[in-house]
Image (spheres, rainbow, N blue to C red):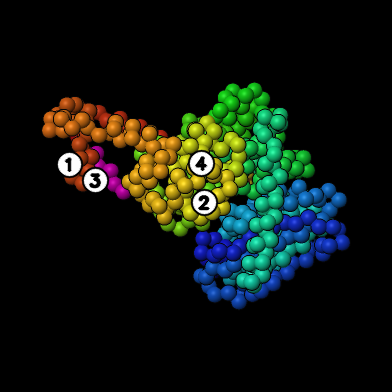
Amino acid sequence: MYVEFGGPKIDYKCELVLAKGMDEVEDGKVEVVGPDLQEFKEGESYPLANIIYVAGAKVEKDLEAVIERRIHDFTNYIEGVMHLNQRYDIWIRISKKSYKKGFNTLKWWGLILIKLFKSAMPFIEKIQVTFYTDPEKVKWWYDQALKTYQARDARVRGLRDEDVDTFYGCVLCQSFAPQHVCVIPPNRVSLCGAMNWFDARAAASVDPKGPNFPIPKGKLLDPIKGEYEGVNKVVNERSLGANKRVYLYSMFSYPHTSCGCFETIGFYIPEVDGFGFVDRGFKGAAVNGLPFATMAAQTGGGIQTEGFLGMGLEYYRSPKFLQGDGGWGRVAWMCSTLRKRIEDAIPEELKDKIPTEKEASDVASLKKFLVEKGHPLAARIKELEAAAAPPAEKVEEVTPLAAVAPAVTPTVSAPGTLVVPAGGGLKIVLKGAKIHIDKIVIKR
Ligand code: SF4
Ligand code: ZN
């Protein structure tokens, strides 16, 4: 890359669309406040606030989030430019090749956005783009933007899935994850966090040919896991048959798919039969030993992966939060960066019982913490430990597995070598796994 804006190395970054009056927007204007591309050092990371003003007879506040989300889509149309994520979490890279070919000012990016917004969303009559790269100004806009996002998120809190007949869908991310369909009921914000039920509804009505559409929810098939006949039908159609059923409030069996934009990841921890949660801002390894990026590869791509779930921040405040899996009672661990942001969502009685990396950095210390604090999972952990431990008097008599079932049991003869006994067979079932093999040798 030539340079990058935002991303994991940069604390302050954001994109924000604001609806303004017709006389407050200078149509077609693009400004760069702070250094522009030619003044940056190759290979470095910089803060950025991309602020867009829009106006038009049909442009309402409700549409801000919807217009804002298309920045991701449209920016990725530009050759040699990458745009990831949304809101306060953006990550943009500009390639050396494009820079050398003339993409040497952010003004090009602004002009492209203006052109694409006006052609895809003709209800935008006026649009003005300002890129702030001056660190002080980016920080100021970042604080403003966070307040705006919070106000948008709060709007949907009073509404319940039971109160509406129609959910909404989004397939904007199918360009990255072709089978992925976001289902957005009032109680489950999209996993990118940028699209709630009101936003998706506004988008579907103003831009019916766009990526958002209504989903008549149909018959409720499972009120606890959140399975609806209408949702299954639409997801099946929009994923071209790849995903036929969806549980909106569970990470097992038929979990909601994840593209790659998720604000946070929920993951199953089998040793405690509970869940851990991590956000993009967390730099270390989670309690299961895996960093965010490794789990992101496992979670994303639009496939249903049991035990891994991309989740928007606002979903933690939902009354349906993982309802099908036991809700907050199954929450065993959370990284401190995420915890800080959703502290208000944690039920009072669990506040001192859910550790972060500071109290539990691996599974052994997690088990200890949960049992000591009397977490709802404590009894389950003891059960699991009792089931795993062999009865003391039988330890001496354990027969090697190979001797019990020589025809089917593989053995490990040397580190990294799996030997299947002659005449035997081997059946391995791996669900949702990704496998990397350097070399495979098959001998008679
Ligand atoms: Fe749309 Fe979902 Fe992608 Fe957000 S994550 S842009 S709601 S498809
Ligand atoms: Zn996405």
Q: Position of residue 136 (x, y in %)?
A: 64, 72
First of labels 3, 2 by sequence position: 2
Disc marking residue 3: none
Give the residue number, with chain letter if any, for mark 4.
349
Amino acid type of the residue tagged 2 in the rendering: Arg
Name the N-terminal-most of marks 4 and 1: 4
The residue where tag 3 is placed is 416
Q: In the image shown, does 440 or 421 lie closer to the viewer?
A: 421
Question: Going from the N terminus, do you reach mark 1 or mark 2 first?
Answer: 2
Q: Is residue 444 visible?
A: yes
Q: CA distance from mark 2 to mark 4?
A: 15 Å
In the rendered view, tell whether residue 9 sits above or below residue 183.
Answer: below
**Residue labelled with disc 1:** 413
Q: How far apart are the two marked residues, 4 and 1, measured between alpha carbons?
A: 50 Å
Mark 2 vs mark 4: in front: 4
**In contact (CB < 8 Å): disc 2 and disc 4:** no
- Residue at mark 1 to residue at mark 2: CA–CA distance: 45 Å
Q: Is residue 294 visible?
A: no
Which residue is drawn at the image coordinates 29% and 32% (left, top)? 386
Name the amino acid, label 3: Gly
Question: Mark 4 or 3, which is nearer the eye?
Answer: 4
Q: Which residue is mark 2?
A: 339
Determine the CA span between mark 3 and mark 2. 39 Å
Q: Nearer the viewer, mark 1 or mark 2?
A: 2
Identify which residue is drawn at 61% across, 27% down. Answer: 228
43 falls in the magenta region: no
Q: Where's residue 364, x and y in %?
A: 33, 46
Which region is colored magenta?
Answer: 436-442
SS at badge 4:
helix
Taking depth in this image into account, of 234 and 202 the one nearest to the observer is 202
